[in-house]
Amino acid sequence: MPTRDQIIEVLKTVEDPELFLDIWFLGLIYNIDIDPIAHKVTIEMTFTSAMCPAGPMLKEEVQTKVKSLEGVEQAEVKITFSPPWEPSEDVKATLGLI
């Protein structure tokens, strides 16, 4: 099974197509659960907005990339909007919002 750090490295390769920043940096990942017995990784994430047009594509890409890691037989992506996404100060600065 991959480590949490290995999963994070894969998540850093998933880019939001509208903001051109990776989903880890954006803070869209809320939780990573690794179940070594079931060989399953569950990711809880959100989108920048509930109406994000890239949402389904992002979800599929996360699931595909996590499942491609050695030892992962199942990858589940749960979408939540609670709490709503709030960009960090670093993200705001990168996007020129502050």
Image (cartoon, grey):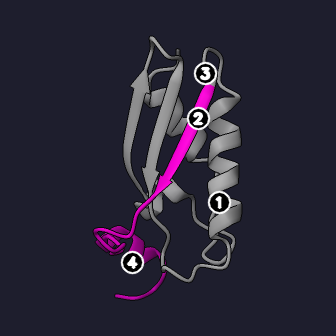
**Camera-nearest label, 2 or 1:** 2
Distance CA(mark 2)–CA(mark 1): 14 Å
Discs 1, 4 touching: Cβ within 8 Å:
no
Distance CA(mark 4)–CA(mark 3): 36 Å
Residue with the mark numbered 4: 93
SS for callout 2: strand
Discs 3, 2 touching: Cβ within 8 Å:
yes
Residue with the mark numbered 3: 72
Q: What residue type is labelled 4?
A: Ala
The mark that comes first in sequence, 4 or 3, is 3
The mark that comes first in sequence, 2 or 1, is 1
Rendering coords of residue 66 (x, y %): 62, 35
SS for callout 1: helix
Distance CA(mark 3)–CA(mark 2): 7 Å
| Residue plotted at (52% across, 25% down) | 40
State which quarter of the image contains the C terminus: bottom left
Residue with the mark numbered 1: 58
Q: Quadrant of residue 3?
A: top left
Rendering coords of residue 29 (x, y %): 42, 53
Q: Which mark is residue 98?
A: none
SS for callout 4: helix
| Residue plotted at (66% across, 31% down) | 67
